[in-house]
């Protein structure tokens, strides 16, 4: 039994290695806010959200589309999905029920544990099948249809009746029937647990005993004080039970593993539902993105906004419209506090969410898959004074360069600004030119006019220039428009905003 709700042909590995870039992606993109909204204070949902979203960005197009169809089913049937998750949790928690776990190191204890556990699991499996029978018609995705078809086919009434009958027999109320052979030195070997005697056989035996008819055979009765004999008989009993106890134990573990995997994979979609509900309360739009092959250069969207910023604010967040198809480099300039960094975060968040199979915080979104995602943001001064800010920036860039793979995406936020304008611009130009030559996708927020204007002067077809919009009175619209770089970032607007009233009072 398999869930197959995250991958078409394999299970999700909750213990997979998180990529190296996670240490910078989480603070730079504000991922803790995203994961917290998905988890809704549930530690297990939090761990699964991190594991899926931050897994290696090598999911192929087919896997993303497979998850998207499942997500659409979840959004249409949230109550059913939550009930399936509740049953998966109930199935996993069956293992904690009962007191038999303390005696599970002996065959008889293992058998007793497995019987009691399997009885609990059967009840949950019945509930799971009932949900599948009642709601299968409401689901259209391959993932859910396969899951429901499996539950219907494998969990039939005959299946449950057979299990009940076997469990009843395995309680051995009429005793344990074991056969063995004499081996070397008259030691017992080839112990086999035999089918218990049927009611007809017991009736025949009673009739024969009543009429004094006995088949040839040998019996013996232990003396109540024969401790060694009782111990030897107990060991024989354990040998006979060993194989069936292990087999039944493996069967219960198989069912438990199914519930564990079902819980893990449904937890991801439960996190998506939690996130969608919070956005819906604010009237924020979401969309199912259109992913493209990694070899293509697609990046166009309408109303894209920073989902983490939205989760922090009561009001809706301003979205942006951009068409960057066939572009490898997007340079973002403009007024301070104009929404450039927020826009950059929205790009990174949308990419991660799309490649995890989630919806995206936009009215529409289309982009090609990236094999890896890196951020290079400016940092505060090194408190240990081991190196300057500029040295630290170059070191981080070197580490990223050593881990770049084909079709990677890089997000730069005011990088290489810790030195003078001329030196910083030249380093930025050389790095971006090298990345452009290798076909990587780059989004670069910068205030370095020498760098931005120099690149703009080349008139490269695969480079797009965006500028944070500013109205004539200094008001920021938080919209980005296609425009060439300007030599000013309008820092005086911020000065007047911060010190204007104070200066007026002092005067």
Image: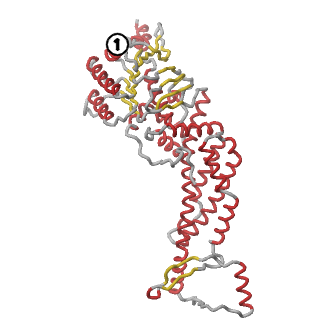
Residue 48, percent across and down? Answer: 50, 44
Q: Position of residue 287 (x, y in %)?
A: 57, 29
Task: Bin the neighbour count of mark 1 within 10 Å (Cα to Cα): few under 14, some 14-19, many 20 and up.
Answer: few
Label 1 element class: helix
Q: How many marks?
A: 1
- Quadrant where the image shows the N terminus: bottom right
Residue at the bottom extreme, as displayed: 212
What colouring method underlies this structural image?
secondary structure
Tell me the residue at 44%/23% (across/down): 326
Work out whether 198 lies above or below 270: below
Q: Is residue 208 above or below residue 486?
A: below
Q: The C terminus appears in which quarter of the rendering?
A: top left
Q: Residue 388 falls in which quadrant of the image?
A: top left
- Give above or below for 487 relative to 426: above
| Closer to us: 162 or 90 | 162
Spot occupied by residue 349 in the image (x, y as percentages of width and height): 47, 31
| Of 119 and 136, the residue lying toward us | 136
132 or 286, nearer to the observer = 132
Residue found 36% across the figure and 35% down from its top: 405
To which quarter of the image does residue 280 belong? Answer: top right
Query: What residue occupies the far top of the structure in this picture?
Result: 507
> Is residue 32 placed above or below 469 in the rendered structure?
below
Write down the residue under mark 1. Answer: 457
> Is residue 85 rendered to the left or right of residue 29?
right
- The structure residue drawn at horizontal position 55% and vertical position 72%, both measured from the top left corner, is 108
């Amino acid at each position: 039994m398999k869930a197959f709700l995250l991958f078409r042909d394999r299970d999700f590995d909750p213990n997979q290695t998180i990529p190296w870039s996670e240490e910078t992606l989480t603070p730079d993109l504000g991922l803790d806010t995203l994961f917290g909204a998905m988890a809704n204070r549930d530690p297990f949902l939090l761990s699964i959200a991190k594991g899926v979203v931050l897994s290696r960005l090598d999911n192929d197009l087919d896997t993303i589309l497979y998850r998207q169809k499942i997500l659409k089913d979840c959004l249409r049937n949230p109550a059913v999905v939550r009930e399936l998750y509740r049953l998966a949790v109930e199935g996993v928690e069956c293992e904690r029920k009962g007191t038999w776990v303390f005696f599970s190191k002996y065959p008889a204890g293992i058998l007793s544990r497995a019987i009691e556990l399997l009885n609990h699991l059967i009840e949950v499996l019945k509930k799971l099948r009932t949900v599948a029978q009642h709601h299968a018609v409401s689901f259209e995705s391959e993932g859910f249809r396969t899951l429901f078809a499996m539950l219907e086919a494998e969990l039939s009434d005959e299946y449950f009746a057979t299990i009940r009958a076997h469990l009843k027999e395995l309680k051995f109320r009429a005793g344990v029937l074991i056969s063995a052979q004499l081996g070397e030195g008259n030691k017992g070997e080839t112990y086999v647990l035999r089918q218990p005697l049927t009611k007809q056989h017991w009736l025949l035996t009673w009739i024969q005993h009543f009429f004094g008819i006995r088949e040839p055979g040998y019996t013996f009765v232990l003396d109540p004080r024969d401790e060694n004999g009782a111990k030897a008989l107990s060991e024989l009993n354990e040998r006979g039970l060993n194989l069936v106890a292990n087999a039944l134990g493996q069967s219960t573990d198989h069912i438990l593993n199914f519930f564990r995997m079902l819980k893990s994979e449904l937890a991801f979609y439960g996190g998506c539902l939690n996130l969608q509900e919070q956005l819906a309360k604010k009237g924020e739009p979401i969309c199912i993105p259109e992913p493209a092959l990694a070899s293509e250069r697609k990046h166009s969207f309408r109303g894209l906004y920073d989902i983490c910023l939205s989760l922090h604010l009561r009001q809706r967040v301003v979205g942006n419209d951009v068409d960057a198809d066939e572009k490898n480099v997007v340079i973002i300039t403009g007024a301070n506090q104009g929404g450039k960094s927020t826009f950059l975060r929205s790009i990174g968040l949308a990419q991660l969410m799309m490649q995890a199979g989630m919806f995206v915080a936009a009215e529409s979104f289309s982009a090609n898959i990236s094999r890896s995602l890196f951020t290079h943001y400016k940092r505060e001064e090194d408190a240990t004074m081991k190196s300057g800010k500029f040295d630290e920036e170059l070191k981080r860039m070197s580490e990223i360069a050593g881990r770049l793979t084909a079709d990677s995406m890089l997000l730069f936020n005011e990088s290489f600004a810790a030195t003078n304008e001329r030196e910083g611009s030249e380093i930025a130009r050389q790095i971006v030119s090298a990345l452009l030559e290798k076909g990587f996708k780059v989004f670069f927020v910068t205030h370095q006019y020498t760098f931005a204007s120099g690149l703009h002067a080349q008139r490269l077809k695969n480079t797009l220039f965006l500028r944070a919009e500013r109205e004539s009175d200094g008001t920021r619209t938080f919209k980005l428009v296609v425009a060439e770089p300007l030599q000013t970032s309008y820092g005086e607007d911020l000065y007047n905003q911060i010190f204007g009233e104070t200066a007026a009072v002092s005067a």
